[in-house]
Amino acid sequence: MRFARLAAPLKFAPTQVAVLLVALYAIVFATVLQYDELSNVPENTHGLDLDRAYDTLAKITTRPHPYISHANDAVRRYILSRLEPLATRHGHVHLSDDMTSNVTFAIGGDRIIYFEGTNVLLKIDGTGSSSRDGVLFSCHYDSVSSAPGATDDGMGVATLLELAEYLSAPERRPRRTAVFFFNNGEEDYLNGAHAYFEHPWSNLTSVFINLEGAASGG
Ligand SMILES: *[C@@H]1O[C@H](CO)[C@@H](O)[C@H](O)[C@H]1NC(C)=O
Ligand SMILES: *[C@@H]1O[C@H](CO)[C@@H](O)[C@H](O)[C@H]1NC(C)=O
């Protein structure tokens, strides 16, 4: 009996599998502890307010805020409250509290999705002449229903709010038009992204940067 066990130390039996699994998790955990470090905040932030960005992240991630939840409405109101002053202050900055870009689309061949738009967009008119080479900066403000969504995608929202404020200043006005896109219902079927193409500003952008959660390391 004892010899048989020694002959097959890695056989597919409860004890062996448990020991292997625990060892495997220990290796993964140790590796993460050793190598998965967040880099330090750079000394020169070029005028970006990183403390406020962190504060924003705390404010919008107090609880899960999936699409069609009251918490989702609160996050949306917060985003608007940050963007409204920018559009009021600067003539070249425009806010779109988009409640009209609705979409209906099919997924997987047997399901139809209907989404009444609740995206928020901010446009900074570029100083250049072309109206169609704008840059789209995208993030989504809904979270999954089981987590507060700090990395997915609260950090994207906090980052774009700061960047929008930064680039709105007349002395930093970019050559190319910038559209900041805070979309909703991403965790469902990329609903907000579908609705973007119903918005007139979608024709102004030709490239995009999408800030989306990529696991806990950022
Ligand atoms: C989208 O739906 C909302 C809510 O029903 C409605 O007010 C709006 O007019 C719709 N948009 C269009 C373009 O029909
Ligand atoms: C974008 O431009 C195309 C081509 O001119 C047009 O068919 C489409 O309706 C426009 N989209 C929006 C949302 O205005």
Image (cartoon, rainbow, N blue to C red):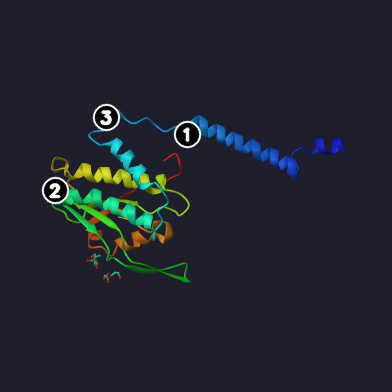
Between label 2 and label 1, give the one nearer the viewer. 2
Label 3, secondary structure: give it: loop
Disc 3 or disc 2, which is closer to the eye? 2
Residue 177 in view here: no
Q: Is residue 146 left or right of residue 117?
A: right
Q: Residue at x 74, y 39 (%)?
A: 10
Name the residue tied to disc 3. 44
Secondary structure of the residue carrying numbered label 2: helix
| Label disc, if present, on residue 152 of the rendered structure | none
Q: Residue shown at 42%/51% (left/top)?
A: 64
**Reading the chain from its start, which is encountered first: label 2 or label 1?**
1
Task: Quarter of the image for the N terminus: give it.
Answer: top right
Crowding near the residue tagged with mark 2, few <14, some 14–19, many ≥20 C-alpha atoms within 10 Å: few
As drawn, the residue found furthest toward the right would be 1
**Mark 3–mark 2 CB contact (< 8 Å):** no
In the picture of the structure, the residue carrying the numbered disc 2 is: 89
**How packed is label 3: few (under 14 Cα within 10 Å), some, or many (20 or more)?**
few
Residue type pointed to by label 1: Asp
Q: Would you name the residue on which mark 1 appears?
A: 36
Camera-nearest residue between 131 and 124: 124
